[in-house]
Image (cartoon, rainbow, N blue to C red):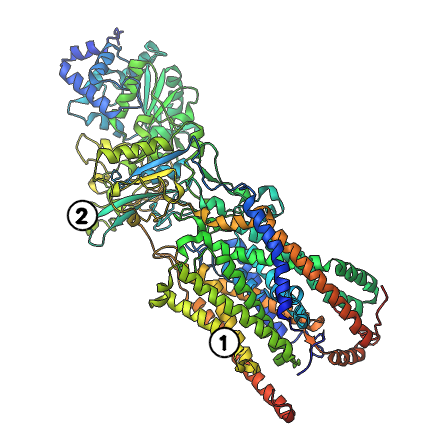
Amino acid sequence: MTRWERSVPVYGVPVLNRGFWGLLIVVVIGLVLSGFREVVGLGSGVSGMSDPFAWGLWKNFNVMVLTGLGSGGFAVGIAAWIFNRTRLHQVMRVALLTSFLAYSTGLTMLGIDVGRPWNFYWVFMPWHWNLASPLLEVAVCITFYATVPLLLENLPPLFEYLIYEFPKWRGFAESCEKALTKVYPYVIGLAYILPIMHQSSLGALMLLGGDRVHALWQTPCLPLIYVWAAAFLGYNCVVLCLLLAKVAWKRDIDPEVLAELNKLTCWVVFTWTAFRFLDILVRGKILFALIPSYFSCLFWIETILIAGSAYVLYSGKGKNLQTMFLAHCTCALGGMIYRFSPTTLAFRPRNGAFYFPTAIELLVSIGFMALAVLGYIVAVKKLAILPASNDDWLKMAKYEEQVKPGIQLTGYAPVEH
Amino acid sequence: MAMTRREAFKNLAKGSLPLLAAGCVSTVLPEVAHAEEVPMPKGALGLLYDATKCVGCKSCMVACNQANELAPDIRTDGLHQAPPALNSFTKNIIKLYRTADGSDHSYFKQQCMHCADPACMAACMFGGLRKDKETGIVWWNGSLCVGCRYCEIACPFHIPAFTWDGFNPKITKCELCRERLAKKLEPGCTTVCPTQAVIYGRREDLLKEAKRRIAASPGRYFENKVYGQVDGGGTQVLYLSRVAFGKLGLPELGEESIPERLKFQHKIYKWLALPAALYAGMVMFAGKNFKEHAHHLVEDQKKTGLRPQL
Amino acid sequence: MAKIEKETIAQSLKNAGYSRRDFLQLCTTIVATAPMGLAFTEKATPAAVAKAVAKAKKPSVVWLHFQDCTGCSETLLRTSKPDVADLILNIISLDYHETLMVACGKQAEDALNSAVSENAGKFVLVVEGAIPTKEKGIYMKLGGRPAMDVLKEVGSKAAAIIAIGSCASWGGVPSADPNPTGATGVDSIITDKAIVNLPGCPPNPYSLLGVVLEFAVMGKLPALDSLKRPKFAYDRLIHDHCPRRAHFDAGRFAGQFGDAGHNQGYCLFKLGCKGPVTHAGCSTRHFNEMVDAWPIGTGAPCFGCTEKAVGFRMPAFDKVDVHLATPPDTYAPIAGSVGTFGAAAAGLVGIAAGALGGAAWATSQKLKSSEEATAEKTPTAGGK
């Protein structure tokens, strides 16, 4: 139990431990199989995709679902910077890191999924953009977002790392930091408008799928529901990362911040659920939810996982860390299932067509997820990402000064501007 | 620090002003690029397939492969061209609809419908699928294609086929033998059809012919309907059939074309007005809060002597 | 031999006692044989053809035999309804034919010399049999001279050369591995004259008649393909006109000689039929003017006698590739089934789900125990 005041790296834990090597093996398997896919193509045995099911695990899960999980950057950011929930600033770095890793691995996965990646350079040539296509919006937006605002937002911990560890780079890093500070509001404005645009466009993608998407999911409001789901998935991911940090690296918890995040999650989930039901009622498709079928089961599983978890969080039980953790797990699971449904689980192109990923597809997908996790673990150990108190920083400083003599982590009086 | 209700409403009011402005801009400004009604090109070419005349000889399948210099799909037994569906070797296929007891059957020739407002074209990010301005033929341009397969998701008729094997995949679909037309030849399929079940011509002429046939033989054609006249916004390939079109695999589409479903999206993004306004609003709020935050950071630094974290 | 004034075909037939009816029947048969590809039958009625043929002068033909079995001559003679052999012999002026002429020895040599010199530049040379080329061509001699030399000499004076049979076209049986005599076809020896190849073992006699008459009536040779074969007779594969094609398309094959499929007359592809790669007209024209008197018709797979790469080269029972695959008699369904469910993949999903679920549960348990530990440590903090 503590009060989070600044970010502190995980110290005293080696980076190259068993977990690291285990994850690295999984990553390498995924990369090797990706190379194999590039040579052999996407058919017969490499992936389970076919003409009726043209999009499979990689696009629908690694890109569409995981970037939803990685929406912490803008979900927490909007609450912190636009609605001025100042306590949330302490978890911004975690949120931004998870976003960055989810988006970069997702974008790479997309590059491996498309059949003619050598033509992707057209994304930089506006005169060939087809403005009618939602996928164009997604491609341009995600590319720009991941390479500019999200990257810039993730640079401060790196600058600090340079400042503390490499005195030679201190001047450069400090001037970069100052420059970034000057333009920061403009950067974060982009960092919030862009994800809203492309997360909703991800939803718009399936509008063109027409009746192939089951009626319980297909709606003209799909973009709005998608971006709203990204918001609560983002919160889920951040809370889970924080609680996992407690278990893995014995970090202290700030119940105030967690309570704030839980409240936000509940608020978003309740409005989301209400809107979803309203949408189904207005479109007159409520019967589909009431008549037992594979689709109604899927719908209720999603809804109960999402809304039920939020209810648990909202009630008194949500203060207990174990319940909180499990509730966020189930809520995230429900949210991921929701985002996976219109493209895969509730997508019926025609009779007789069926999709199940192949082992290779799964291994590549898992490999890229492992890459993100690996990146996360290395980053939190090397950089100041996870939140802690000022006292924890001083403890860390004492430890580091023993290990790396000459390093200065304290005693920085403010410079008059 | 918790926000008071007063503050919340103030913020909401401040935030909705730019939204309101953007909303006005979006609705008042004229439509850009994407028109609501998509007229048929003047010289629109097409096919008329009369399932009641087709005898299932499949000469059109052989002729199509030959005309397009495409190797036939012999993967089933190595001897025969027997594709199970349209695929990277097959731009045109004859399928058989048959009831379980064999009491009713009909052949069905499946190939690209060359829609008036193609969903595949709306889907394609960089314009890899485009509609010829004169003939209305929808064709694939490999140099602009990324292989994302969104066109396959969008096409309501399940036409574009992706090359699943190999490292240089293409999108394969009927292009009405564009290159032959340039040489004043007819498409491969219509040239060889022995019963003239599929014929080629200008879409308006084909539509007239279809209507004439319906009028000349009442009761012969399902619901006296020409499929493709208005379906999905209108297609250049028209169908006449005795059995229900749905049984042949043709989807039931209203008069609205598929890309019309993106109408609202396009309204929101018009001139990027709404996003720009939202961005302006966010920068405004973020800037204000950032100043406050920076002030707190300096205060904290004075107290602790620890470098502030952005 | 005394010089005979070249009569027209009409006169010749009349002198031989043929009725106009017989002649018209012959012309009908020619039109049926070659409705396309021959200039004089193109879009012509039998009556028109008869008129054109009647006016033409009897062409002089010199027929040389080299490494042959005389099968090609025999096939010409094995026609009887009407007696085409006789007709042919009265339509053309066969000035030299070792099997059919009476002369022998020195008389035969003189016959050849006079036939060639009298009709120099105007006669049609028909060559039957391959020409040996090894060791200066000593393996076949005509009147003590190597065949090669005879061919070159006679051929140089011919107006056109018809190589009848696979042997004369590209070497045929004598050229089979190891080809000890260096047997080869006419167009390897003579390269500066118009040559028409009529491969086959034997070829259909009407092919010969068509070529000869085209020359006699129109003064030129019919349209030829890249292997110098007349298109009207060799532009199609056996496979494309085979009466058993429906069995091929339906997947009904004879597996062994004498099995049920073979007895039913099923497709002989699996027995090594070379029909898919052999250009010839046998599947429609048959032989001996009898229906089904052709190899496949009798249940024997085609061995590709007209094709240099196939006949006498490919083993009899080796299956060939079908170059232009066409659809079978089955149809694609309106909605076929697509998609597989791999056991390995399912297992992987199960393992991943189990691992994640287990990890989540373990983590939650750790959180519970750590909370309890915290609560124990600060019992007065209200157990928050």
Whole-number angstrom distance, CA of label 1 to CA of label 2: 78 Å
Residue position for label 2? C263
- Vertical placement of A214 versus B77: above or below? below
Residue position for label 1? A311
Nearer to us in this view, C294 or C332: C332
Q: Is residue A315 left or right of residue B277?
A: left
- In the image, which disc is placed on residue B2? none
Nearer to us in this view, A70 or B68: A70
Which of the 4 image quarters holds residue C5? top left
User: What kind of element bears circle 2?
Assistant: helix
On the image, the x and y values in percent for residue C208 come to 28, 23
On the image, the x and y values in percent for residue B178 come to 44, 34
Q: Which quadrant holds the C terminus of chain A? A: bottom right
User: What kind of element bears circle 1?
Assistant: helix
Task: Give the residue displayed 81% in from the left and 76% down from the top.
Answer: B303
Q: Is residue A335 left or right of residue C201?
A: right
Residue type of the residue flagged with mark 2: Asn
Which of the 4 image quarters holds residue B29? top right
Q: Is residue A361 visible?
A: yes
Task: Give the residue displayed 60% in from the left and 49% down from the top.
Answer: B273
Residue type of the residue flagged with mark 1: Tyr
**Chain holding disc 1:** A
Tally the marks: 2
Extreme residue toward the front, this view: B6
